[in-house]
Image: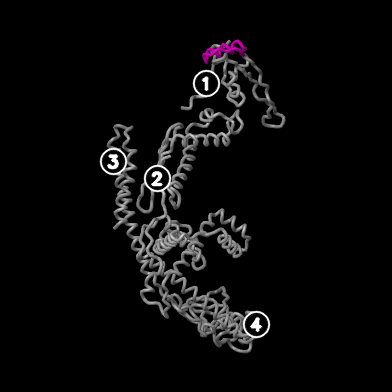
Amino acid sequence: MQVSVEQLQGSQVRLAIEAATDDVGSAFDKAYREISRTVPVPGFRPGKAPRQWIAQVIGREVVGERARELLVEETLKQAIEGQSLDILGEPRLDLPEEVPAEGAEFSYSATVVVKPTFELPQYRGIPVEREVKAATDELVDEEIESLRAKHARIVPVTDRPAQEGDLVDIEYFVYPADQLAPVSPRRMPMVLCLGQNWFSPSLDDDVVGMSLGDAKVITRTSGGQMMNYDIRIRNIQQRILPEVNEEFAMRTTGFESVEELREDIRTRIQSQFEALTRESAINRILARLAKECRFDLPDILIRAAVRRRLIAWVSALRNDNPEMAHYLASSDAALEAAGERFRPSARAAVRRALLLDAIAKAEGITVDEAEIAAKVAELAERTGTSPDVARRQLEAQGGLADIEEEIRNAKAEELLWSAAVVTEVEKLSDAELAILDEVEELEAREDEQARAAEAEAAQAQQEAAEAAGAEAEAGTESPASPEPEASPEEASETEATPGTEAASE
Amino acid sequence: MFETPYDVIVRPLITEKSVGGSSQGKYSFRVHTDANKIQIKDAIERIYEVKVTKVNTLIVKPKPRRRGGKYRMGHTPVWKKAVVTLAAGNEIKLFESTE
């Protein structure tokens, strides 16, 4: 088997593969064996029919097609491994129309997208600012207040009107202010926490002072129209917050004293701050690297990243705006249009992942089986299954590779962080804050350029195809002329050249 | 009674068993039920231009088959099989050549 490699634009590689007679022969052997075992031939037990008879009964074409499939599968795998290419997605095959013949050679070509290669910039000692945030007493107090609210006792109120802080259970109906009340209105139940303005427009001010069973018509502007809200108080409840003392600490968190509780909250807030500021600093380190290290991103990775963002966005939208989510899920065009705005951030994420990958490779970072097992066990615990089941599921979905990548990237991030020159500051400087936006803008600009180049290439290809079509039409007098067959090659050549020019701009 | 040799020989049989015999110069055919060994020998020699040394024949018995309802019985056709032995050095090509 002979393989020749040609680099194309956009991290694509064309492999021209020439399979030797032996390879073709063994592919045919396999095809015959497979067909004779699976396709019933009258007069023979499965797997026992002679080859010539199979060819005659089933058809030489059928056997040839299967042999071609097997041959391509085998040789392409060998070629990719032989050239040690790190391919992404599925290869695009360019097969000749005729099926291979036994005892002859067979050549074809395949275009694969490979992980882009690029020169890694200096990634050690990158200066970065880290915000120093302290867990202040106020923050601890806030946390304690929310803990009190969570453990509040709720008691019904009957002897006084509603006041701020009460939970008021009302029923209401709405109608335009210039109309009489609807004849048979359907009353809607609702709970208000007075002072927190849960409902829009806020009715809280008017509800304060109303007693159990009171009814009132409140006029408010909603959506540019005056509306009447006819409300009736069904129930008033009071929240009684527990006192902060040893009993409270013991009951809510199991600490023996309030000081211990406060200390625990303080450490938790502090570690949260640290994790957050560290993560944001690492993001800025990577953004700095990305800004320096520009290379063509494979479209297939961008698409996958956009897709992941779209899925997350649509599923978040299901809660907020179900109709919109439904519309998006039903229309591919709408989804694609919506995906446009994720492209810059998707590009940035892809570049970041490729950078981390390259750093991991350069540093020889590896992930061992125990680390993967630990991560799988963690995942299994979160989803409530056993590690074995989780592992099998992941294996079936090909998720183990993702986990491995995740661990490797985390290690690469750790390395970047420990090698960075960190300056601790009270407040991040403007330049530091702007870096993420800058990178995203850069990506958006490059995306636009890449797409313009793509459109140009597509147009050139179309023009070439049209020209070839006209040429073929002119040559219809000799129908067996090989010209029309040559045209796709011409077209693909014209596709490659303007693209590379545009990409290098 | 038979006008051409093709009236005697219906078709060669290509099954695991018949193909297995071809290495010993034995070939099987479905033949006309009324054809006798002499007619078969003659027909094979004329169609394939080979020398036949022996002809064995047998009647393939019908098998009962149900047709439609429970009590409507039928059977598979009765036919005659001939196993023809060729003289050494003779051969019949059962399959089209692959190339």
Asked whether, in this view, residue A107 is left or right of residue A263, the answer is: left
- Any mark on residue A306, and which? none
Q: Count the numbered circles shown.
A: 4
Rendered-image quadrant of the N terminus of chain A: top left
* A97 in relation to A424, above or below: above
Which label's residue is closer to the chain start, 4 or 2? 2
Local secondary structure at mark 1: loop
Percent of width and height locating residue A382: 59, 65
Chain holding disc 4: A
Which of pointers 3 and 1 indicates the residue nearer the eye?
Answer: 1
C-alpha gap between disc 2 and disc 3: 31 Å
* B82 in relation to A383, above or below: above
Which label's residue is closer to the chain start, 3 or 4? 4
Residue marked by disc 1: B93
Mark 2 crowd level (few <14, some 14–19, many ≥20, 10 Å Cα):
many
- Any mark on residue A15, and which? 2
Q: Amino acid at mark 2?
A: Leu
